[in-house]
Amino acid sequence: MEYQVQNISRDNFEQCIKCTVCTVYCPLLSVNPDYPGPKQAGPDGERYRLKNPAFYDSALKYCLNCKRCEVACPSGVRIGDIIQRARIRYDRSPVKLRDRMLANTDFMGTVAGALAPVTNFMLRRRIVKQGLQAVLGIDSHRTFPAYSATTFAQQFKSLADAQKGYPRQAVYFHGCYVNYNYPALGLDLVRVLNAAGIGVRLIKGERCCGVAKIANRLTDSARADARHNIKAMQAALGADADAPVLFTGSSCAFTMRDEYPHLLEVDNSAVRSNMMLASAWLAREVERGAVKLVFKPEYTRRVTYHTSCHIQKLGWAIYSIRLLKLIPGITFVPVESQCCGIAGTYGFKKENYATSQAIGAELFDKLRRIAPDVVACDCETCKWQIEMSTGIKVENPISILAEALDFEATAAANR
Amino acid sequence: MVFLKFFERRQLVIQIFLCNFEAQNTIMLNNTQLLKEYDVVIIGAGATGAGTARDCAMRGLRTLLVERFDFTAGATGRNHGLLHSGARYAVTDRESATECIEENMILRRIARHCVEPTGGLFVTLPEDDLGYQSTFIDACRAAGIDARAIDPAEALRMEPSVNPAITGAVTVPDGAVDPFRLTTANVVDAKLHGADVLTYHCVEELIKEGDRVRGVRLRRQGSQELFDIRSRLVINAGGIWGHGIAAMAGININMFPAKGALLIFGHRVNNVVINRCRKPADADILVPGDTISLIGTTSSRVPYDAVDRMDVTQEEVDILLREGMKIAPALAYTRILRAYSGVRPLIASDDDPSGRSISRGIVCFDHAARDSVEGMITISGGKLMTYRLMAEQAADMACRKLGVEAACRTAELPLPGSEEEPKPEKKRFRKSHIIELSTNQLAAKGRHGTLSGDIDFSRDSDDALVCECERVTAAETDYAINRLEVNNLVNLRRRTRLGMGTCQGSICACRASAMLARSFGNDVALADLASFINERWKGMRPVGWGQTLVEANFSAWIYQGVCGLAPGKTDTSAL
């Protein structure tokens, strides 16, 4: 019988050789000394929690779940997963009303969207913000993104019929932000893909990917959504088993690819390899000659690319950057990959605001010095954070592409 | 009655007065004030020696405990750390089984902070005879052990790591006991009761006057100078090395050195002790000990002259893994931190080649009766579980021989650290004054019990970790160095678990060494650091594959590469 061929432990926590590299890369540790750091909170703490759950340290709630520790780890330990799993398993404190509201993006989006003009007006009033801070603990510095009166899914209906006419097909997981707040990004993608000769399908009854629910310990609800999403995704692919499932939010993509099997224990193997970020997928399609893009000659922009933590974990930032570099009018200025501090709903919480801004301070400073026309970024919450903190405009690479693209020429080139 | 009590008290006062008077007749040694003559000198600071020192001191004897190296340096520190229910011996050795269960219940009371009442399972594998189970349960019950057959499915719920193929399961009141903590607590209590303690002092000779042993001739490790300590009685609690001590008095004790090897796994695989329900054999006990799990043991006779250099062989590792994974399949792929072995100090009574059927019973020799040598007692045999009973028997014999009448109270009085804690006051205000211990302080409390209150966490830097794997803080390290007879890193490891975790000292050894250097100087600390790292490697080598090998490389990189320690030039003999 073979034994000790390899050491396997849940999330590889025993692979940890205590080199402490993760601790160096943790964006939180340098601004919050109360946080034990990824090694302590993760593999070290796990040994103690296995001995006695009383060793669960409530400071683990400060973890951003940015996964930069996992990227840094030379031994393949899923440190972030260990920490999130410990929070889910051992933190028995009740989930606050505020956290439930922030995490239930579908519910909040539907309610707020129905009354969009009123909600948007109200959410920008100082008095309302102060009320939200006092009553719920949502920091008054934050402004919620404006809600759209009609969702992306509703707006897409008029385009749906035309999609079947394209020779190639792609499934698009738009996510909550595009649906409730910023349908323009989704429409940009549809226009770009259509010009490239690709028809778009949505996922029937798409629900939130669950990133916010996981971060706020609402795992049962997240798991139900996840099971639904995977099933609906398979249905949307139908006979086109090789068609891509595209995302415009890096956190949605990351959650559905990696957190579903790792944290929610939802099997996504049937569709996992189809899932890809739209910008990354397009870059590779262009590079292999399957898609041709033609740009407006007059378009010029100075652009930098902010690597969100989850795209860093996915390892796809390089593709988004290559896509941007395809645009001849773009002057690309690189900036170091650093966490902006928002971490989804984390930065919205009153108790995390100062931490959130302290983490991002260095990045904001660098961006101000670069002073680009626009910062390209695949993550919406990074967009809110950077726009609020620097005043510089942040756009998804797809929107930048849509702005630069000569649609007619592109459509002709791909015919 | 009242008068009698008054009289007793007067006697006590007289005794104290006498002690004080005699205390002037002392010698100073390394900050320890020693008497020139003791009632008893106990040789060997394993659990038995420490327990005997505690018992003698509590009975008012002037007591000196002498140890060649450090507390728990022999078999005490090299076993399973199993709080036996006695079930393992129920079928083959009723007497030991009864002793075990009685001591088990006593230790749960007096040594709360050293004991973890995990409960135990005796499981029957498909290849084992299920018929043995009823024999086993009957024998347990006859010995007073609460053994109950349960459904195998229930056993799996109790302990998910157990082999799902088991055909039978019995619960018994097993647990885990930390031998390092237990021994240290006994030493601390002995000192509180007036005993003196000398570690790193070797007995070179027994002082004899005719057929009478009158004391010991000691040499401090690393020095050539000899000095004499006289005593009315010498108690030999030297474990397997007791053979050599007895030989100094011209006495032959027929020791049977039986080596047992064990493996330490990187984390807790199980939270309930798992035993195999069959006649005792190799690798049939898996014990959860603090943050790790231990599988053991093997049993093989070794020549007496080999007991100082025990290495775990590849065959032993193979046996432990092959048999161990039958009771808990996860052992097949769980990282192994290290391998180690100890030598059971059994007293041979027949020609059993395996040593397993030799009684684990207690042997307490009065050498006056046995060998016509007055003034010497040997206490041996037994096991960690029965250390207190062994101490009681030795102290009883000592009192008899010295004509002292004093009852044993070690079964009633809790060890320092294990006292009942006052119940927390009723909280008048919700939340307002709940003081939450940090997880580091919680870990320290687990190790030192109520004594952890003496650890000073007042400065911010005190909560800083020295050993990250085992959560040993700067404050706890300081406390151990100042209060628990720490001379080097190995001592520190035994008092705190520093260096026992996943990284085996890679991260913490240099930090702790810097703290030791404040007391012992840089040169001493540096040599000690090198020997500590070598000692860690010794245990990793037999299981040096996978991440354990990567870890060892990382450690070598830190200590050779970054710290610049030269390999292979340090003396590990003092370990």
Image (cartoon, rainbow, N blue to C red):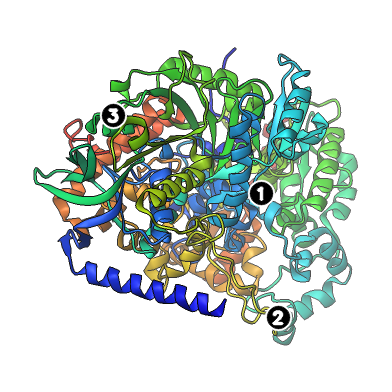
B289 or A204, which lies in front? B289
- Quarter occupied by the N terminus of chain B: bottom right
The chain carrying label 2 is: B
Q: Which residue is mark 2?
A: B430
Q: Is residue A224 left or right of residue B515?
A: right
Q: Which residue is mark 1?
A: A85
Is B380 located above or below residue A390 in the figure?
Answer: above
Indicate the amino acid at tag 2: Arg
Indicate the amino acid at tag 1: Arg
Image quarter of residue B556: top left
Which residue appears at 22% of the width and 34% of the height?
A: B573
Which residue appears at 34% of the width and 70% of the height?
A: B15
* Dot 1: element: helix
Is B123 located above or below residue B446 in the figure?
Answer: above
Indicate the amino acid at tag 3: Ile
Is A11 located above or below residue B433 in the figure?
Answer: above
